[in-house]
Amino acid sequence: MLPALALLLSCRPSKTADDTGPVDTGAGPRFSTEALWGPSNDWEPTVAADAAGPWVYEATTRIGAMLAKTVVRVSGDHGQSWGEDVVLSDTYTAYDPQLAVAAETGCVFFAWLGGPSGWGTFVRRSCDHGQSWSEPVSIAPEGWTTDHAWMVVSPDGQDVYLAFNGAEAGEDKESGKGYVAASHDGGASFQDVHVAGDASTEYWFQTGAALAPDGSLYVANAVYSMDYTGPAALVLWRSTDGGAHFETKTVASSQEPPDCPWAAGCSFGFFGAQAAVAVDAAGALLFAWTATDTAGGDLQTWAASSPGGAWWDQLGAPVLLSTGLGLNGMPLASAGPMAGDFRVAWQGNRPGAEPASFHTWYQQSADGGATWLDAPLSLSDQATGADYKTEAGYAFPYGDYFGMSVDGQGMAHLVWSEGASWEGPGGTWDSRQLE
């Protein structure tokens, strides 16, 4: 096991994981008990915390009988209580919400997938804590298709980046190409940059993004074959000129993912390898990923870091974060307000356990990724509250991503969805760090 972090505060016992399941060690940061957003059929949520105030924003996709809508709610007390749900998408079916807060201004940006074609991505902005929002702005030219953009915003709110998989007008929407849309006028307009992707042989899927203090943009990617068979690559992009040009580096690889026929609606590739990236206050880089070294085998969660200002040439040795766990997916990475402060989260179950034993796991490091908690914490700590929850965990991750953000006090906020299967139904749950 890895040594415990010396800087952790003493607090109540937290759930951790080993080969036999959740146990009580008494170590780790303290989190609130997970709470269900509401009775709606909600999935694929996200969260963004204000670095300079008490404001926290959450968004989720609400699946209705006729349309899916993207819904936002606002907290003015660090996530202790929430305002009313507000639908910010248009009258069309909408998915894939994203939130980001400009650290210096407090303006919050909201992005979603929808529009008349169902494959457009749009951005709105609020500078009064969600009381009013700007008109939607498309990130891509007319006729383009876009899919699940990952958004990051500069501290002053002028630079807005969205990394997405998509296709130009007239191309197959499953072309496999990767793009970054860049705005340098606060989201009023965007310029699209084709970064990488071979429409005939590879599928580039963007899975996370981060901005460094010097303005460098990093995008995490998973690169699959077009049918998800065979090995996958975990790739990092870097731009030092505002998204005009990118360098590309392959950081890790994975064998073919396991299938999931035991979960209704789950198709091959759902547990494909993914990656996430974060940059701390000193410019140090953390890359986290899930991968399997055996075709169809268990997926584990890894992380590796490089010192402040370094590119991947000074990458440290990978650290296994999910020791004892089995089907791990959807990794997230965030940086706290202090140098060396990194957080990683993912959803996963345990090898040899019943499939319906998923948890939302959390890890953190205070020394730039050199050491981590003795074991990951389970934030999904309730055995009741929905039909898909038992003592073993929840039945399935509802959707293929969730959200994590760290506020200016260093407190992590996480929001995720649990469900009966890929088809659902399910709900959005959240938890916040208390100390």
Image (cartoon, grey):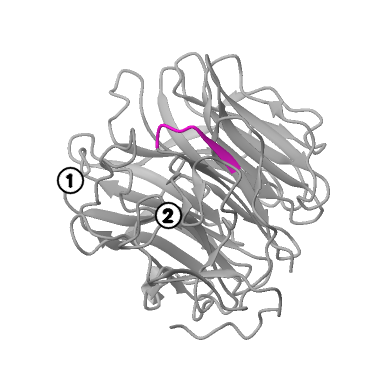
Magenta span: 422-428
Total numbered circles: 2
Q: Mark 1 or 2 closer to N-term?
A: 1
Q: Is residue 150 visible?
A: yes
Quadrant for the C terminus, please: bottom right
Magenta region includes residue 424: yes
Q: Which residue is mark 1?
A: 229
**Residue at the (63%, 32%) spot, across then down:** 39
Q: Residue 367 vs residue 395: left or right?
A: right
Whether 405 is drawn above or below 5: the answer is above
Residue 367: x %, y % from top left: 57, 79
Q: Residues within 10 Å of mark 1 (few under 14, many from 20)?
A: some
Q: Residue 428 vs residue 149: left or right?
A: right
**Residue 357: numbered disc:** 2
Quarter where residue 134 is shown: top right
Q: Is residue 186 visible?
A: no
Whether 273 is drawn above or below 157: the answer is below
Q: Amino acid at mark 2?
A: Ser
Residue 363: x %, y % from top left: 53, 68
Q: 86 or 139, which lies in front?
A: 86
Quarter where residue 146 is shown: top left
Secondary structure category for the residue under label 2: loop
Magenta region includes residue 60: no
**Residue at the (61%, 70%) spot, across then down:** 14
**Residue at the (40%, 37%) spot, across then down:** 422
Could you give the CA–CA distance between mark 1 and mark 2, rounded to whole angstroms?
Answer: 26 Å
- Observer-side mark, 1 or 2, equals 2
